[in-house]
């Protein structure tokens, strides 16, 4: 006869499996709802050329804004690096500059390899 611990463990494992299945089902239903909403939105946009152009222009503007934001962050990093080097004692500046260049070269190489 199985011990009480074995019965409890079996029940807990069964409950966990059942909950996992329910979660999968809920996720699947949510995906279906999202797909239907997207379909409805696409139909509305396709039916109205003026709205389609307006949405397209807005998306393009958003993408440009994100690129500009990235450029601003890059410029801040550049300014921060310059400031950091200005704060470093003169005898360490060259070594620190070389380390920064090496670090950026590695990062850029890694980014380019992933594209």
Image: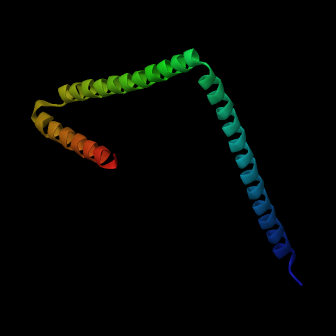
In the displayed orientation, state which residue is furthest to the bottom.
Answer: 1
Establish if 46 lies above or below 94: above
- Please indicate whether residue 19 sits to the left or right of residue 34 in the image: right
Residue at image coords 68%, 43%: 31
Residue at image coords 39%, 23%: 69
Q: Dividing the picture into quarters, in which one does residue 88 lie?
A: top left
- Residue 77: x and y in percent read 29, 28
Residue at image coords 50%, 22%: 56
Q: Quadrant of the C terminus?
A: top left
Establish if 94 lies above or below 55: below
Between 44 and 29, the one lying in front of the other is 44
What colour scheme was applied to this rendering of the protein? rainbow
Q: Quadrant of the N terminus?
A: bottom right
- Residue 54: x and y in percent read 53, 16
- Residue 15: x and y in percent read 81, 61
Establish if 78 lies above or below 112: above
Establish if 55 lies above or below 103: above
Residue at image coords 72%, 39%: 33
Q: Dividing the picture into quarters, in which one does residue 72 lie?
A: top left
Between 106 and 40, the one lying in front of the other is 40
Count of labels in the image: 0
- Please indicate whether residue 65 sits to the left or right of residue 82 in the image: right
- Residue 106: x and y in percent read 24, 46
In the displayed orientation, state which residue is furthest to the right.
Answer: 1
């Amino acid at each position: 006869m199985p011990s009480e611990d074995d019965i409890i463990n079996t029940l807990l494992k069964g409950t966990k499996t059942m909950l996992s299945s329910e979660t999968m089902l809920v996720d699947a239903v949510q995906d279906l709802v999202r797909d239907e909403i997207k379909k409805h939105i696409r139909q509305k946009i396709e039916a109205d050329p003026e709205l389609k152009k307006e949405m397209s222009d807005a998306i393009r503007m958003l993408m440009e804004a994100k690129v500009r934001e990235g450029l601003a962050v890059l410029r801040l990093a550049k300014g921060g690096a310059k400031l950091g080097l200005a704060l470093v004692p003169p005898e360490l500046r060259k070594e620190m500059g070389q380390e920064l260049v090496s670090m950026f070269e590695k990062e850029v190489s890694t980014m380019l390899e992933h594209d």
